Amino acid sequence: MAEINPSTQLRVDAERNRSINLKSLKNQVKEEIEKAENLKELNEIFKKYLGKESQITQILRSLEKLPKAERAKIGKEANEIKKFLEEKIEEKKSSFAKTTEDRGEWFDITAPGKKPAIGHLHPLTLVRRKVEEIFQSMGFSVVEGPDAESEWYSFDALNIAKDHPARDMWDTFYLKERRLLRPHTTPVDVRYMEKNNPPLRIIIPGNVYRHEATDPSHEFQLFQVDGLMVDKNISVANFKATVGEFFQKFFGKPINLRLRPDYFPFTEPSFDISISCVVCAGLGCSTCKNSGWLEMAGAGMVHPNVFKNSGLNPKEWQGWAFGLGLDRLAMMKYKINDIRLLRSGDLRFLNQF
């Protein structure tokens, strides 16, 4: 009998060992796949035996170093085992999906995911947009002005005397060089009339600031809307019709309107605006202090001196103006009992809107 070359015998032994290892590996993996109880375990098996550092991958990478005949045989076996394992893993995955579907927990993976929670509009923003929408539908333009104002536009041009209590430090936040944080948005009325010829229809939304203590019905920062209408033949009747239409559209139901005499330096005559209580429909409740009425704004016919200070002839033009608190409107619309909640930043409150 011819003797076998020692090096040939080593290659034969190595080839036999590789075949044995591959067959043993195939049985081992098959057993682990059958025992897997969930997708997580199945994924771990995949990484272990078919991943980049797995034994099968290492065998496939080392084929180029083997003799041609051995490379073909071992390569074929390794690829067959790889394919076998991939098929078994997919079968197991399908069985998991079928079991989940049978339990009524199956879901369509192609369906869009859940939308993440996103921000939403602040109640004051909602109210502001509604107010602007209503007045714009009646032909009004939305105008804005600076928060930091001069004394001229805040007081002098509005016919407010030098010794008027409104100029007191307790009501007004003064800045340097006799500038101040505006206590109302009415200064923009004068600014606009200086640069625009009548007829005019504008509303002026914006923040105002007043030096006062806070409580459930008072804040040092408020959101106000001023309104101004100037034309040849403007009367209180025009004002009452316009504002009445606004309240009815804003609250979405019939609203009774009441004007009572009042005093504001920049209007003559002046009056306050009250509406029938939106909570009790005028019957009397704690919101309206059993009066059936809610005071909502101050208004009046534009004072002749304001026209003069704006560069308009009061003998030629007439107009009315009003100041309305958006905070109060928001409180009425959404039944909020504490004005401080609006700027508290408390998400438990804000997420309700």
Image: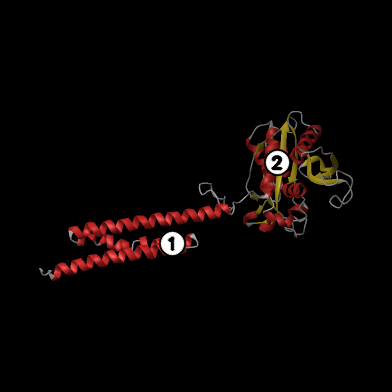
**Gap between marks 2 and 1 measured at Cα:** 67 Å
Residue type, label 1: Ile
The numbered mark, 2 or 1, whose residue comes first in the sequence reads 1
Q: How far across and how far down the image is residue 86, in percent? A: 38, 56
Residue type, label 2: Val
| Residue located 39% across and 63% down the image | 29
Q: How far across and how far down the image is residue 17, in percent? A: 26, 67
The residue that label 2 is drawn on is 131
Name the residue nearer the viewer: 265 or 90: 90
| Residue located 52% across and 52% down the image | 98
| Residue located 63% across and 49% down the image | 120
Number of other residues with Cα within 10 Å of mark 2, as a class: few under 14, some 14 to 19, many 20 or more: many
The residue that label 1 is drawn on is 33
Name the residue nearer the viewer: 90 or 65: 90
Q: In what element is the residue under mark 2?
A: helix
Query: Can residue 220 be seen?
Result: no
Q: Residue furthest front?
A: 1
Q: In what element is the residue under mark 1?
A: helix
Tell me the quarter of the picture where residue 227 sits: top right
